[in-house]
Image (spheres, grey):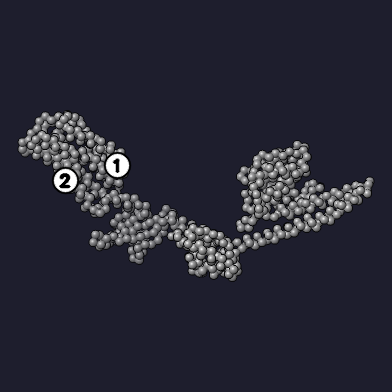
Amino acid sequence: MVSVSLYTLGNAVRVASLTQSAYHIGTTVKYAGILGLGPAQLWFGLTYSDRDTLLDWRHWALLLALPVATFALVVTAPYHDLLWAVEGFVSRPPAASIAREDTALVWLNFTYTYTLAAATYALLAFVGLKRGRKYRRQVAVMLAGGIIPLVASMVLLSGSNPAAAWDPAAFAFTITGVIFAVALFRFDFLDLMPIARHALVDEMADPVFVVDLEERIVDANTAAVELLDDETQDPLGEPASEVVPVYESLASRGTDADVTIETDGRLRYFDAERTTLTDRTDTPIGSLFIYRDVTERHIAEERFKRLIEGASDMVSVLDTSGTITYVSQSVENVLGFEPSEMTGESVVSYIHPDDQADIAEDLSKYVDDYGYTGNYRARVRDSDGEWRVLEARAANLLDDPFVEGIVLNSRDVTEKQHRKRKLERQNERLDQFASVVSHDLRNPLNVAVGRLQLLDATLDGDRADTVDTIQRQLDRIEDIIEDSLALAQSGEIVTETEDVDLGRLAREAWANVDTDEATLVVDDSVRLAGDRNRLLTMFENLFRNSVEHNESTGLSVRVGALPGVGFYVEDTGEGIPPEKHEQAFERGYTTNRDGTGFGLAIVRDIVQAHGWAVSLSEGADGGVRFEVECDAIPLEKQAEHD
């Protein structure tokens, strides 16, 4: 309309001009309006159709390049003939006029302006086709208004004289402005522009219904229509009670409700909200129903709830006074209480008297330390009055608006404690056994060996063979004592470890064993945390097993890394029959007449004491291959997982 005003003003100045210079001033003002009409209309069309973001500064520069250049030529027209050549000026009544010969640039600008106008009306038509009936009527009125100046311009240009004194297009554009104003404001869009309605309602993912005072649907966005049954394609005018989900509940009893709707074979969850619509005098004119889709949130909350309730660990929340404000359903499995029984109670009342003071003091000390975490162990009373041992990790989330409490993640470790004490007693018995073997049995054995040596010095002939036989048996008893001692010690849980280079340890163990002509090959050096002395014993027993059960000539023993975490020991000997693989690790099993059968049992116990696993298979060259997987759970932690 600013461009139309300049257009009309310039035309009026031209008609009333008494001099050619005044006429040129009117022409300049008129062209400012004409050249602005095309870009201004396109801007309006893009804004109305929600496409104004397309006009960044680069596109604006491109759009205004021709109009700006042409306007510069209009201003300087008296000094050149690039636009037109003036052939005469007449100032007599009733209107001043000028005779001129226009160049192609004038017609190019008219073509440019009409092209932009056509693009504008195409955008308006697209909006009318895409949106509802109310918008179609509005667009139809605006398009009708746009035809008037088009016809007037055609009348002006039909005489091939754009410089004619009487320009009907100026008056036609004024009529168009009035029609556009009526179209925009007559259809209840004084407070809500079409683009705002389109952006905020039509494009919303949440269904929206507008219901009038007669409880009929007067508007519904695309998401709302998609929510309804396939049979209800156009809900406008339909009774709200028959179309809007839970309408009666929202209309009569409240302003919000939870809604579950099955669509396309799946359940969707909504938070429905009703808002009363009023006019400028606060008089109710209808209701707005918004259904916010909370399906993802509902699924996440339900998943979290079920994970918490199904977990073996117990989650509880305490306030600053130690009162339980929340406890998960898993408390029923851990302590036998219902969550409602413990909610509102002091957590201290469930803790053993001997443990209360320390825990209460520690928690109160850090009540103002947001983010503090600590680990605790205490005896807690269950529903039967028995004391259960719980390990808890506390986290101070009092300042978290979603928690506002101290969170305790508790785990029942009563059975773990029992297993730990059982393992400790087992280790004590093994220590006692080792003491008996190493002291009580070794002393009489040493006496027998000493006496046999004295007897050997006085005997000869056949009786000397008897002495040799006794000596071999005593040596065997010595081996059994050594292996029994190693077996007892190998079964103890590894509690202290160090960084061990298995390649270097394997070479050391190889030097400790009588390997004769066999050779050792270390392919990879693996570094692990373990008990160095027991791992050395393990390698010695594996190497001794290979050498004692095979010819040493040409025998090769290889040590290398496994994929992941682990290592292997493999030889090129005769191997062990597959049916004997499991039996090979049993105590006392041996195929060597002079063997004790404890070697591989010791290997298995040492591996398991580290929390690892050992297996036996056939090697690449037919020998035996031992594989040790080192990513298993250590024994002291296995109790937690049993």
The answer to whether any part of residue 171 appears in the image is yes
Residue at screen point 29% across, 39% down: 59
Of the pair 221 and 460, the residue shown nearer to us: 460
Residue furthest front in the image: 365
Of the pair 562 and 147, the residue shown nearer to us: 562
Horizontal relation, residue 271 to residue 559: left or right: left
Cα separation between marks 1 and 2 = 28 Å
- Dot 2 falls on a residue whose secondary structure is helix
Query: For the residue marked with disc 2, what is the amino acid?
Result: Ile
The image's mark for residue 55 is 1
Percent coordinates x, y for residue 541 in the rendering = 74, 47
Query: For the residue marked with disc 1, what is the amino acid?
Result: Leu
Earlier in the chain: of badge 1 and badge 2, it is 1
Q: Which residue is mark 2?
A: 175
Q: Which mark is nearer the camera, 1 or 2? A: 1
Residue furthest left in the image: 93
Q: Is residue 158 above or below residue 193?
A: above
Of the pair 41 and 462, the residue shown nearer to us: 462
Residue at screen point 9% across, 32% down: 89
- Please tell me how crowded label 2 is: few (under 14), some (14-19), or many (20+) other residues with Cα within 10 Å: some
Percent coordinates x, y for residue 244 in the rendering = 35, 59
